[in-house]
Image (cartoon, rainbow, N blue to C red):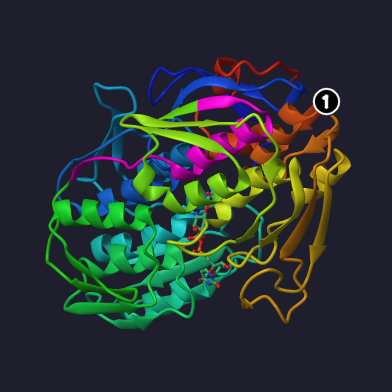
Amino acid sequence: MSGMIYQQEATGLSSPRRHVDRMRINGGKALSGRIELKGAKNLVTKAMVASLLGDGVSVLRDVPDISDVEVVSGLLELHGVSITAGTEPGEMILDPSRVELAHMAEINAYAGDSRIPILFCGPLLHRLGEAFIPDLGGCRIGSRPIDFHLDALRNFGARVEKLPEGIRMTAPERLHGAKIELKYPSVGTTEQVLLTAVRAEGTTELKGAAIEPEIMDLIAILQKMGAIISVDTDRVIRIEGVDRLSGYSHRALFDRNEAASWAAAALATEGDIFVGGALQKDMTTFLNVYRKVGGAFDIADDGIRFYHPGHALKSVVIETDVHPGFMTDWQQPLVVALTRAEGISIVHETVYENRFGFTDALVKMGAQIQLYRECLGGHPCRFGQRNFQHSAVISGPTELHGADVVVPDLRGGFSHFVAALAAEGTSNISNVGIISRGYEHFIGKLDQLGADFDVTA
Ligand code: EPZ
Protein backbone atom coordinates (compact mmCIF):
# COMPACT_ATOMS: atom_id res chain seq x y z
CA MET A 1 0.00 0.00 0.00
CA SER A 2 1.38 3.32 -1.02
CA GLY A 3 1.83 5.84 1.73
CA MET A 4 0.54 8.61 -0.52
CA ILE A 5 -2.85 10.26 -0.38
CA TYR A 6 -4.32 11.79 -3.49
CA GLN A 7 -5.20 15.42 -3.10
CA GLN A 8 -8.35 15.41 -5.13
CA GLU A 9 -10.59 17.85 -6.85
CA ALA A 10 -14.31 17.22 -7.15
CA THR A 11 -14.42 16.94 -10.91
CA GLY A 12 -15.68 13.41 -11.44
CA LEU A 13 -14.13 10.03 -12.05
CA SER A 14 -10.73 11.00 -13.38
CA SER A 15 -9.93 14.07 -11.38
CA PRO A 16 -6.39 15.46 -11.36
CA ARG A 17 -4.51 14.37 -8.24
CA ARG A 18 -1.44 15.33 -6.30
CA HIS A 19 0.20 12.82 -4.01
CA VAL A 20 0.33 13.65 -0.31
CA ASP A 21 2.03 11.49 2.31
CA ARG A 22 2.37 13.71 5.40
CA MET A 23 0.17 16.35 6.94
CA ARG A 24 0.56 18.74 9.83
CA ILE A 25 -2.60 19.45 11.83
CA ASN A 26 -2.97 22.41 14.17
CA GLY A 27 -5.68 21.15 16.49
CA GLY A 28 -8.15 22.62 18.92
CA LYS A 29 -10.47 24.06 16.27
CA ALA A 30 -14.12 22.98 15.90
CA LEU A 31 -14.99 21.45 12.51
CA SER A 32 -18.04 23.08 11.10
CA GLY A 33 -19.78 23.23 7.73
CA ARG A 34 -21.36 20.94 5.19
CA ILE A 35 -19.95 17.98 3.27
CA GLU A 36 -21.59 15.69 0.73
CA LEU A 37 -21.42 11.91 0.65
CA LYS A 38 -21.22 9.75 -2.44
CA GLY A 39 -21.89 6.03 -2.80
CA ALA A 40 -20.65 3.54 -0.21
CA LYS A 41 -17.17 2.14 -0.85
CA ASN A 42 -18.39 -1.23 0.40
CA LEU A 43 -21.18 -1.35 -2.18
CA VAL A 44 -19.69 0.45 -5.18
CA THR A 45 -16.68 -1.84 -5.54
CA LYS A 46 -18.95 -4.93 -5.46
CA ALA A 47 -21.47 -3.34 -7.87
CA MET A 48 -18.59 -2.79 -10.29
CA VAL A 49 -17.74 -6.52 -10.10
CA ALA A 50 -21.43 -7.41 -10.68
CA SER A 51 -21.20 -5.72 -14.09
CA LEU A 52 -19.10 -8.73 -15.20
CA LEU A 53 -22.23 -10.90 -14.96
CA GLY A 54 -24.28 -8.89 -17.46
CA ASP A 55 -24.60 -9.25 -21.24
CA GLY A 56 -24.95 -5.49 -21.64
CA VAL A 57 -23.64 -2.18 -20.38
CA SER A 58 -24.10 -1.18 -16.70
CA VAL A 59 -24.37 2.37 -15.39
CA LEU A 60 -23.43 3.12 -11.78
CA ARG A 61 -23.99 6.57 -10.27
CA ASP A 62 -22.49 8.29 -7.21
CA VAL A 63 -19.21 6.42 -7.57
CA PRO A 64 -16.75 8.01 -5.11
CA ASP A 65 -13.30 9.19 -6.21
CA ILE A 66 -11.32 6.83 -3.95
CA SER A 67 -8.35 4.56 -4.56
CA ASP A 68 -10.31 1.33 -3.89
CA VAL A 69 -12.47 2.23 -6.90
CA GLU A 70 -9.32 2.83 -8.95
CA VAL A 71 -8.00 -0.59 -8.02
CA VAL A 72 -11.22 -2.35 -9.01
CA SER A 73 -11.41 -0.31 -12.23
CA GLY A 74 -7.87 -1.42 -13.05
CA LEU A 75 -8.70 -5.07 -12.37
CA LEU A 76 -11.87 -4.92 -14.47
CA GLU A 77 -9.98 -3.28 -17.33
CA LEU A 78 -7.36 -6.04 -17.14
CA HIS A 79 -10.25 -8.45 -17.70
CA GLY A 80 -11.46 -6.61 -20.81
CA VAL A 81 -14.20 -4.45 -19.26
CA SER A 82 -14.29 -0.97 -20.77
CA ILE A 83 -14.91 1.78 -18.19
CA THR A 84 -15.82 5.33 -19.08
CA ALA A 85 -17.22 8.34 -17.22
CA GLY A 86 -20.87 9.23 -17.75
CA THR A 87 -22.34 12.69 -18.08
CA GLU A 88 -22.94 13.44 -14.38
CA PRO A 89 -20.04 13.60 -11.91
CA GLY A 90 -19.48 10.19 -10.32
CA GLU A 91 -21.28 8.30 -13.12
CA MET A 92 -19.47 5.22 -14.40
CA ILE A 93 -20.30 3.19 -17.48
CA LEU A 94 -19.05 -0.40 -17.54
CA ASP A 95 -19.11 -2.43 -20.74
CA PRO A 96 -18.32 -6.14 -20.22
CA SER A 97 -18.88 -7.26 -23.83
CA ARG A 98 -15.21 -8.28 -24.29
CA VAL A 99 -14.38 -10.03 -21.02
CA GLU A 100 -11.16 -12.04 -21.22
CA LEU A 101 -8.70 -13.78 -18.92
CA ALA A 102 -5.99 -11.58 -17.45
CA HIS A 103 -2.40 -12.69 -16.87
CA MET A 104 -1.57 -13.76 -13.31
CA ALA A 105 1.39 -11.38 -13.21
CA GLU A 106 -0.80 -8.43 -14.16
CA ILE A 107 -3.42 -9.31 -11.55
CA ASN A 108 -0.65 -9.76 -9.00
CA ALA A 109 0.57 -6.24 -9.74
CA TYR A 110 -2.61 -5.13 -7.98
CA ALA A 111 -2.27 -7.58 -5.08
CA GLY A 112 -2.09 -6.04 -1.64
CA ASP A 113 -4.27 -3.08 -2.51
CA SER A 114 -7.73 -4.54 -2.10
CA ARG A 115 -9.65 -7.60 -1.01
CA ILE A 116 -12.10 -7.26 -3.91
CA PRO A 117 -10.26 -9.63 -6.35
CA ILE A 118 -11.75 -12.61 -4.52
CA LEU A 119 -15.22 -11.48 -5.61
CA PHE A 120 -14.23 -11.75 -9.29
CA CYS A 121 -14.20 -15.57 -8.98
CA GLY A 122 -17.89 -16.43 -9.44
CA PRO A 123 -18.51 -14.05 -12.37
CA LEU A 124 -15.26 -15.08 -14.12
CA LEU A 125 -15.95 -18.79 -13.60
CA HIS A 126 -19.35 -18.30 -15.24
CA ARG A 127 -17.97 -16.32 -18.16
CA LEU A 128 -14.58 -17.90 -18.76
CA GLY A 129 -14.45 -21.11 -16.68
CA GLU A 130 -11.31 -19.85 -14.92
CA ALA A 131 -10.26 -17.26 -12.34
CA PHE A 132 -7.17 -16.32 -10.34
CA ILE A 133 -6.90 -14.72 -6.90
CA PRO A 134 -3.66 -12.97 -5.94
CA ASP A 135 -2.41 -12.51 -2.41
CA LEU A 136 -5.16 -10.44 -0.80
CA GLY A 137 -4.61 -7.12 0.89
CA GLY A 138 -7.05 -4.82 2.65
CA CYS A 139 -6.61 -3.16 6.02
CA ARG A 140 -4.51 -5.11 8.52
CA ILE A 141 -7.08 -5.44 11.28
CA GLY A 142 -7.03 -9.18 11.92
CA SER A 143 -5.97 -12.35 10.12
CA ARG A 144 -8.79 -11.88 7.55
CA PRO A 145 -8.87 -15.48 6.22
CA ILE A 146 -10.74 -16.47 3.01
CA ASP A 147 -11.74 -20.00 4.04
CA PHE A 148 -15.50 -19.26 3.90
CA HIS A 149 -15.10 -17.95 0.34
CA LEU A 150 -13.16 -20.98 -0.86
CA ASP A 151 -15.58 -23.43 0.80
CA ALA A 152 -18.54 -21.67 -0.83
CA LEU A 153 -16.91 -21.72 -4.29
CA ARG A 154 -16.08 -25.44 -3.91
CA ASN A 155 -19.75 -26.03 -3.00
CA PHE A 156 -20.77 -24.45 -6.31
CA GLY A 157 -18.51 -26.96 -8.12
CA ALA A 158 -15.35 -24.86 -8.57
CA ARG A 159 -11.93 -26.55 -8.42
CA VAL A 160 -9.51 -24.66 -6.18
CA GLU A 161 -5.76 -25.02 -6.73
CA LYS A 162 -3.21 -23.26 -4.51
CA LEU A 163 -0.15 -22.04 -6.45
CA PRO A 164 2.90 -20.13 -5.15
CA GLU A 165 1.64 -16.91 -6.77
CA GLY A 166 -1.98 -17.21 -5.59
CA ILE A 167 -5.06 -19.40 -6.05
CA ARG A 168 -6.32 -20.68 -9.42
CA MET A 169 -9.94 -21.72 -9.84
CA THR A 170 -11.56 -23.62 -12.64
CA ALA A 171 -15.11 -24.69 -13.42
CA PRO A 172 -14.95 -27.89 -15.49
CA GLU A 173 -18.76 -27.69 -15.88
CA ARG A 174 -21.37 -24.99 -15.32
CA LEU A 175 -21.46 -24.10 -11.62
CA HIS A 176 -24.49 -25.48 -9.81
CA GLY A 177 -26.66 -24.21 -6.94
CA ALA A 178 -25.57 -25.16 -3.42
CA LYS A 179 -26.69 -25.32 0.20
CA ILE A 180 -24.28 -23.21 2.24
CA GLU A 181 -24.27 -22.33 5.92
CA LEU A 182 -21.85 -19.69 7.23
CA LYS A 183 -20.27 -20.10 10.67
CA TYR A 184 -20.29 -16.28 10.94
CA PRO A 185 -22.36 -13.78 8.89
CA SER A 186 -19.45 -12.66 6.71
CA VAL A 187 -20.20 -9.70 4.44
CA GLY A 188 -17.71 -10.71 1.74
CA THR A 189 -18.76 -14.36 1.66
CA THR A 190 -22.45 -13.42 1.42
CA GLU A 191 -21.53 -11.25 -1.58
CA GLN A 192 -19.45 -14.09 -3.02
CA VAL A 193 -22.44 -16.44 -2.80
CA LEU A 194 -24.80 -13.87 -4.38
CA LEU A 195 -22.44 -13.08 -7.27
CA THR A 196 -21.92 -16.79 -7.96
CA ALA A 197 -25.42 -18.21 -7.33
CA VAL A 198 -27.30 -15.80 -9.61
CA ARG A 199 -25.99 -17.57 -12.72
CA ALA A 200 -25.46 -21.06 -11.31
CA GLU A 201 -27.73 -23.90 -12.44
CA GLY A 202 -30.52 -24.47 -9.91
CA THR A 203 -31.28 -23.05 -6.49
CA THR A 204 -28.90 -21.88 -3.76
CA GLU A 205 -29.76 -21.57 -0.11
CA LEU A 206 -27.47 -19.49 2.08
CA LYS A 207 -27.96 -19.74 5.84
CA GLY A 208 -26.24 -17.42 8.30
CA ALA A 209 -26.00 -14.63 5.68
CA ALA A 210 -24.91 -11.06 6.40
CA ILE A 211 -27.72 -8.55 5.77
CA GLU A 212 -25.90 -5.21 5.79
CA PRO A 213 -27.60 -2.39 3.79
CA GLU A 214 -24.75 -2.63 1.25
CA ILE A 215 -25.69 -6.28 0.66
CA MET A 216 -29.35 -5.33 0.23
CA ASP A 217 -28.28 -2.73 -2.36
CA LEU A 218 -26.22 -5.37 -4.19
CA ILE A 219 -29.30 -7.61 -4.21
CA ALA A 220 -31.30 -4.71 -5.68
CA ILE A 221 -28.70 -4.36 -8.45
CA LEU A 222 -28.74 -8.09 -9.20
CA GLN A 223 -32.54 -8.04 -9.32
CA LYS A 224 -32.36 -5.20 -11.87
CA MET A 225 -30.07 -7.46 -13.91
CA GLY A 226 -32.67 -10.25 -13.93
CA ALA A 227 -31.71 -12.32 -10.84
CA ILE A 228 -34.26 -14.02 -8.57
CA ILE A 229 -33.25 -13.56 -4.92
CA SER A 230 -35.38 -13.72 -1.78
CA VAL A 231 -34.26 -12.70 1.68
CA ASP A 232 -36.09 -14.72 4.30
CA THR A 233 -36.19 -14.21 8.04
CA ASP A 234 -33.30 -15.42 10.21
CA ARG A 235 -30.49 -14.63 7.77
CA VAL A 236 -31.55 -17.06 5.02
CA ILE A 237 -31.12 -15.98 1.39
CA ARG A 238 -32.47 -18.07 -1.52
CA ILE A 239 -31.29 -17.56 -5.08
CA GLU A 240 -32.77 -19.21 -8.19
CA GLY A 241 -30.07 -19.27 -10.83
CA VAL A 242 -30.86 -17.88 -14.30
CA ASP A 243 -29.14 -18.45 -17.68
CA ARG A 244 -28.36 -14.85 -18.44
CA LEU A 245 -28.34 -11.40 -16.85
CA SER A 246 -28.46 -7.95 -18.43
CA GLY A 247 -26.61 -4.78 -17.41
CA TYR A 248 -28.04 -2.45 -14.75
CA SER A 249 -28.58 1.22 -14.07
CA HIS A 250 -28.25 2.15 -10.40
CA ARG A 251 -27.49 4.96 -7.98
CA ALA A 252 -25.34 3.55 -5.15
CA LEU A 253 -26.58 3.87 -1.59
CA PHE A 254 -24.80 6.48 0.53
CA ASP A 255 -21.64 5.73 2.52
CA ARG A 256 -22.90 5.30 6.08
CA ASN A 257 -19.39 4.59 7.35
CA GLU A 258 -18.16 7.93 6.09
CA ALA A 259 -21.25 9.60 7.60
CA ALA A 260 -20.49 8.06 11.01
CA SER A 261 -16.85 9.15 10.75
CA TRP A 262 -17.73 12.84 10.21
CA ALA A 263 -20.43 12.62 12.90
CA ALA A 264 -17.78 11.50 15.39
CA ALA A 265 -15.44 14.26 14.17
CA ALA A 266 -18.15 16.86 14.92
CA LEU A 267 -18.52 15.52 18.45
CA ALA A 268 -14.83 15.19 19.25
CA THR A 269 -13.92 18.67 17.97
CA GLU A 270 -17.01 20.29 19.55
CA GLY A 271 -18.14 21.15 16.05
CA ASP A 272 -21.21 21.08 13.83
CA ILE A 273 -21.24 19.15 10.53
CA PHE A 274 -24.11 18.68 8.08
CA VAL A 275 -23.53 15.38 6.28
CA GLY A 276 -25.40 15.68 2.98
CA GLY A 277 -26.81 12.39 1.68
CA ALA A 278 -26.84 10.60 5.08
CA LEU A 279 -30.05 8.62 5.62
CA GLN A 280 -31.55 7.90 9.02
CA LYS A 281 -32.92 4.47 8.12
CA ASP A 282 -29.50 2.88 7.62
CA MET A 283 -27.97 4.62 10.64
CA THR A 284 -30.48 4.06 13.43
CA THR A 285 -28.10 1.99 15.56
CA PHE A 286 -25.38 4.61 15.22
CA LEU A 287 -27.81 7.45 16.00
CA ASN A 288 -28.98 5.68 19.19
CA VAL A 289 -25.41 5.43 20.47
CA TYR A 290 -24.62 9.00 19.37
CA ARG A 291 -27.59 10.21 21.40
CA LYS A 292 -26.56 8.13 24.44
CA VAL A 293 -23.10 9.74 24.34
CA GLY A 294 -24.85 13.11 24.39
CA GLY A 295 -24.32 13.99 20.73
CA ALA A 296 -27.02 16.05 19.03
CA PHE A 297 -28.42 15.50 15.54
CA ASP A 298 -31.18 16.90 13.33
CA ILE A 299 -32.52 14.75 10.54
CA ALA A 300 -33.40 16.49 7.27
CA ASP A 301 -34.61 15.10 3.94
CA ASP A 302 -31.22 15.65 2.32
CA GLY A 303 -28.89 14.64 5.15
CA ILE A 304 -28.18 14.74 8.88
CA ARG A 305 -26.70 17.57 10.95
CA PHE A 306 -24.40 16.23 13.71
CA TYR A 307 -23.20 18.57 16.46
CA HIS A 308 -21.79 18.87 19.94
CA PRO A 309 -24.52 19.64 22.52
CA GLY A 310 -22.47 22.29 24.35
CA HIS A 311 -22.35 20.33 27.60
CA ALA A 312 -20.38 17.33 28.87
CA LEU A 313 -20.51 14.03 26.94
CA LYS A 314 -21.50 10.78 28.68
CA SER A 315 -19.69 7.45 28.77
CA VAL A 316 -21.25 4.40 27.06
CA VAL A 317 -20.82 0.66 26.63
CA ILE A 318 -20.67 -0.43 22.98
CA GLU A 319 -20.42 -3.85 21.42
CA THR A 320 -19.65 -3.97 17.70
CA ASP A 321 -21.60 -6.52 15.69
CA VAL A 322 -22.90 -7.43 12.25
CA HIS A 323 -25.94 -5.51 10.97
CA PRO A 324 -28.26 -4.46 12.53
CA GLY A 325 -25.71 -4.09 15.34
CA PHE A 326 -23.17 -1.30 15.84
CA MET A 327 -20.73 -1.57 12.91
CA THR A 328 -17.07 -2.32 13.53
CA ASP A 329 -16.16 0.54 11.15
CA TRP A 330 -17.90 3.07 13.39
CA GLN A 331 -16.02 2.51 16.63
CA GLN A 332 -12.60 4.05 15.85
CA PRO A 333 -13.57 7.74 15.36
CA LEU A 334 -16.18 7.48 18.12
CA VAL A 335 -13.53 6.25 20.58
CA VAL A 336 -11.88 9.68 20.17
CA ALA A 337 -15.12 11.37 21.25
CA LEU A 338 -15.30 8.95 24.19
CA THR A 339 -11.92 10.19 25.46
CA ARG A 340 -13.77 13.48 26.09
CA ALA A 341 -16.80 11.90 27.81
CA GLU A 342 -17.17 11.81 31.60
CA GLY A 343 -16.63 8.36 33.10
CA ILE A 344 -15.61 4.93 31.89
CA SER A 345 -16.63 3.77 28.41
CA ILE A 346 -16.22 0.22 27.15
CA VAL A 347 -15.96 -0.91 23.53
CA HIS A 348 -16.12 -4.67 22.90
CA GLU A 349 -15.00 -5.44 19.32
CA THR A 350 -16.59 -8.72 18.18
CA VAL A 351 -16.13 -8.60 14.39
CA TYR A 352 -12.32 -8.38 14.05
CA GLU A 353 -9.89 -9.76 16.61
CA ASN A 354 -7.23 -7.07 16.16
CA ARG A 355 -8.91 -3.72 15.63
CA PHE A 356 -7.57 -1.64 18.52
CA GLY A 357 -4.01 -1.04 17.26
CA PHE A 358 -5.05 2.55 16.48
CA THR A 359 -5.49 3.32 20.21
CA ASP A 360 -1.68 3.38 20.76
CA ALA A 361 -1.55 6.73 18.96
CA LEU A 362 -4.47 8.08 21.01
CA VAL A 363 -2.66 7.11 24.22
CA LYS A 364 0.41 8.93 22.91
CA MET A 365 -1.83 11.98 22.53
CA GLY A 366 -2.97 11.81 26.16
CA ALA A 367 -5.97 9.45 26.07
CA GLN A 368 -6.44 6.90 28.85
CA ILE A 369 -7.28 3.66 27.10
CA GLN A 370 -6.57 0.14 28.30
CA LEU A 371 -7.01 -3.00 26.24
CA TYR A 372 -8.19 -6.35 27.59
CA ARG A 373 -8.34 -9.90 26.28
CA GLU A 374 -11.64 -10.55 28.08
CA CYS A 375 -15.07 -9.88 26.54
CA LEU A 376 -16.02 -6.79 28.57
CA GLY A 377 -19.37 -5.14 28.89
CA GLY A 378 -21.45 -7.46 26.74
CA HIS A 379 -21.89 -10.99 25.54
CA PRO A 380 -19.00 -13.44 25.28
CA CYS A 381 -17.75 -13.48 21.67
CA ARG A 382 -15.65 -15.92 19.59
CA PHE A 383 -12.43 -14.05 20.52
CA GLY A 384 -12.98 -14.31 24.28
CA GLN A 385 -10.96 -17.34 25.25
CA ARG A 386 -8.12 -16.49 22.91
CA ASN A 387 -5.19 -14.16 23.04
CA PHE A 388 -6.77 -11.10 21.39
CA GLN A 389 -6.96 -7.66 22.97
CA HIS A 390 -10.44 -6.95 21.69
CA SER A 391 -12.02 -4.93 24.55
CA ALA A 392 -11.10 -1.29 25.23
CA VAL A 393 -11.75 0.70 28.40
CA ILE A 394 -11.65 4.45 27.87
CA SER A 395 -11.47 6.74 30.93
CA GLY A 396 -12.51 10.33 30.46
CA PRO A 397 -12.55 13.16 30.16
CA THR A 398 -8.96 13.67 29.01
CA GLU A 399 -7.37 16.56 27.15
CA LEU A 400 -5.60 15.42 24.01
CA HIS A 401 -2.32 16.99 22.88
CA GLY A 402 -0.63 16.90 19.49
CA ALA A 403 1.83 14.12 18.59
CA ASP A 404 3.56 12.47 15.60
CA VAL A 405 1.53 9.49 14.46
CA VAL A 406 1.47 7.02 11.57
CA VAL A 407 -1.81 5.94 9.96
CA PRO A 408 -2.24 2.18 10.50
CA ASP A 409 -5.44 1.44 8.52
CA LEU A 410 -8.43 3.24 7.01
CA ARG A 411 -10.75 3.74 9.99
CA GLY A 412 -7.95 3.84 12.58
CA GLY A 413 -6.29 6.50 10.42
CA PHE A 414 -9.44 8.60 10.32
CA SER A 415 -9.58 8.42 14.12
CA HIS A 416 -6.00 9.75 14.26
CA PHE A 417 -7.08 12.74 12.21
CA VAL A 418 -10.08 13.30 14.49
CA ALA A 419 -7.81 13.15 17.55
CA ALA A 420 -5.27 15.53 16.01
CA LEU A 421 -8.04 17.99 15.07
CA ALA A 422 -9.47 17.83 18.61
CA ALA A 423 -6.07 18.04 20.36
CA GLU A 424 -4.29 21.15 21.60
CA GLY A 425 -1.11 21.78 19.62
CA THR A 426 0.37 20.39 16.45
CA SER A 427 0.36 16.81 15.16
CA ASN A 428 2.32 15.37 12.25
CA ILE A 429 0.51 12.51 10.54
CA SER A 430 2.30 10.27 8.07
CA ASN A 431 1.27 7.38 5.81
CA VAL A 432 -1.94 9.28 5.17
CA GLY A 433 -2.37 7.64 1.73
CA ILE A 434 -4.47 4.87 3.24
CA ILE A 435 -7.23 7.42 3.88
CA SER A 436 -7.81 7.80 0.13
CA ARG A 437 -8.94 4.15 -0.03
CA GLY A 438 -12.28 5.07 1.49
CA TYR A 439 -12.72 8.83 2.02
CA GLU A 440 -13.40 10.90 -1.07
CA HIS A 441 -11.78 14.34 -1.35
CA PHE A 442 -10.60 14.06 2.25
CA ILE A 443 -8.29 17.06 2.15
CA GLY A 444 -10.89 19.20 0.39
CA LYS A 445 -13.48 18.26 3.01
CA LEU A 446 -11.12 19.14 5.88
CA ASP A 447 -10.64 22.51 4.21
CA GLN A 448 -14.39 23.02 3.76
CA LEU A 449 -14.92 22.28 7.46
CA GLY A 450 -12.37 24.88 8.52
CA ALA A 451 -9.58 22.58 9.72
CA ASP A 452 -6.18 24.18 10.22
CA PHE A 453 -3.60 22.01 8.41
CA ASP A 454 -0.67 21.96 6.01
CA VAL A 455 0.27 19.34 3.50
CA THR A 456 3.94 18.75 4.28
CA ALA A 457 4.90 16.20 1.58
C1 EPZ B 1 -16.32 -6.02 4.87
O1 EPZ B 1 -15.13 -6.77 4.98
C2 EPZ B 1 -15.90 -4.58 4.73
N1 EPZ B 1 -15.02 -4.45 3.58
C3 EPZ B 1 -15.21 -4.10 6.00
O2 EPZ B 1 -14.94 -2.74 5.87
C4 EPZ B 1 -16.16 -4.29 7.18
O3 EPZ B 1 -15.47 -3.94 8.36
C5 EPZ B 1 -16.60 -5.76 7.25
O4 EPZ B 1 -17.20 -6.17 5.99
C6 EPZ B 1 -17.62 -6.00 8.35
O5 EPZ B 1 -18.75 -5.20 8.14
C7 EPZ B 1 -15.53 -4.37 2.36
O6 EPZ B 1 -16.74 -4.41 2.15
C8 EPZ B 1 -14.57 -4.19 1.25
P1 EPZ B 1 -16.31 -10.10 6.71
P2 EPZ B 1 -15.15 -8.35 4.78
O7 EPZ B 1 -16.12 -11.18 5.72
O8 EPZ B 1 -16.24 -8.70 3.83
C9 EPZ B 1 -14.15 -13.51 9.33
C10 EPZ B 1 -13.63 -0.79 5.97
O9 EPZ B 1 -12.87 -0.15 6.75
N2 EPZ B 1 -14.01 -14.32 8.08
O10 EPZ B 1 -17.71 -9.74 7.08
O11 EPZ B 1 -13.76 -8.77 4.46
C11 EPZ B 1 -13.23 -12.29 9.30
O12 EPZ B 1 -11.91 -12.62 9.67
C12 EPZ B 1 -13.57 -2.29 5.92
O13 EPZ B 1 -14.40 -0.24 5.19
C13 EPZ B 1 -13.50 -15.59 8.17
O14 EPZ B 1 -13.17 -16.09 9.26
O15 EPZ B 1 -15.56 -8.79 6.24
C14 EPZ B 1 -13.92 -11.35 10.28
O16 EPZ B 1 -13.54 -11.68 11.58
C15 EPZ B 1 -12.59 -2.95 6.78
N3 EPZ B 1 -13.32 -16.31 7.00
C16 EPZ B 1 -15.41 -11.68 10.07
O17 EPZ B 1 -15.46 -12.95 9.40
C17 EPZ B 1 -13.65 -15.79 5.78
O18 EPZ B 1 -13.47 -16.49 4.75
C18 EPZ B 1 -16.18 -10.67 9.25
O19 EPZ B 1 -15.51 -10.46 8.02
C19 EPZ B 1 -14.19 -14.50 5.72
C20 EPZ B 1 -14.36 -13.77 6.88
- Going 31% across and 44% down the picture, which residue do you hit? 80
Which type of secondary structure does the marked residue at label 1 adopt? loop
Q: Which amino acid does label 1 sit on?
A: Glu
Left or right position of 389 against 321: right
Expressed as whole percent of the image width and height from the top left, the position of residue 361 reads 81, 43
Q: What stretch is highlighted in magenta?
A: 248-273
Residue where numbered disc 1 is placed:
424
Q: Nearer the viewer, residue 84 or 145?
A: 145
Is residue 296 at least partly visible in the picture? yes
Disc 1 under 8 Å from ligand 1? The reply is no
State the image coordinates of residue 359 (x, y, percent, origin top left): 77, 49
Residue 262 among magenta residues: yes
Q: Quadrant of the N terminus?
A: top right
Residue nearer the viewer, 186 or 83: 186
Residue 384 image point, x, y percent: 70, 77
Q: Which of 379 and 55 is in front in this view?
A: 379
Looking at this rendering, what residue extends furthest in the front direction?
Answer: 311
Q: From this view, report whether residue 398 is shown above or below residue 192.
A: above
Q: What's the residue at 58%, 65% (across, down)?
A: 351
The image quarter in which residue 151 lies = bottom left
Q: Foreground residue, 35 or 162?
A: 35
For the point 53% across and 74% down, the residue is 162
User: Horizontally, is 372 left or right of 113 in the view?
Assistant: right
Whether 255 is among the magenta residues is yes
